[in-house]
Amino acid sequence: MRKQQRPRRYVNQQLLTLLAPLFRYSLTRDAYVLRLVGSHVGPVLRVNRRRRRSAAYAGPERRTA
């Protein structure tokens, strides 16, 4: 049994839709894993819901106050 978690890879929803026949959703991991062998080997995929970075802050510098 593996004690260290496999790293999650963030992919967009369209790619997961294309890979749906190969992956299943695991409630315990809150991620998608390979069918049949995903509980032991293979990638662990999550939907990329992280926001893109916004434009650089143009206001006054407040951290050195």
Image (cartoon, grey):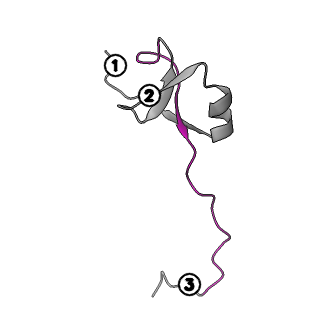
The residue most toward the top is: 36
Q: Is residue 48 left or right of residue 40?
A: right
Of labels 2 and 3, the one closer to you: 2
Residue 13 forms part of the magenta stretch: no
> Dot 2: what SS?
loop
For the residue carrying disc 1, how many other residues have a C-alpha within 10 Å: few (<14), some (14-19), or many (20+)?
Answer: few
Q: What residue did someone put label 2 on? A: 6
Compared with residue 31, is residue 24 higher up or lower down, i.e. above or below? above
Q: Position of residue 35 (x, y in %)?
A: 51, 16
Q: Are marks 1 and 2 in contact (CB under 8 Å)?
A: yes
Residue 21 numbered mark, or none:
none
The quadrant of the image that shows the C terminus is bottom left
Q: What residue did someone put label 1 on? A: 2
> Is any part of residue 35 visible from this angle?
yes
Residue 61 numbered mark, or none:
3
For the residues labelled 1 and 2, the Cα–Cα distance comes to 9 Å
Q: Position of residue 44 (x, y in %)?
A: 50, 28
Q: Earlier in the sequence, mark 3 or mark 1?
A: 1
Q: Foreground residue, 8 or 35? A: 35
Of labels 3 and 1, the one closer to you: 1
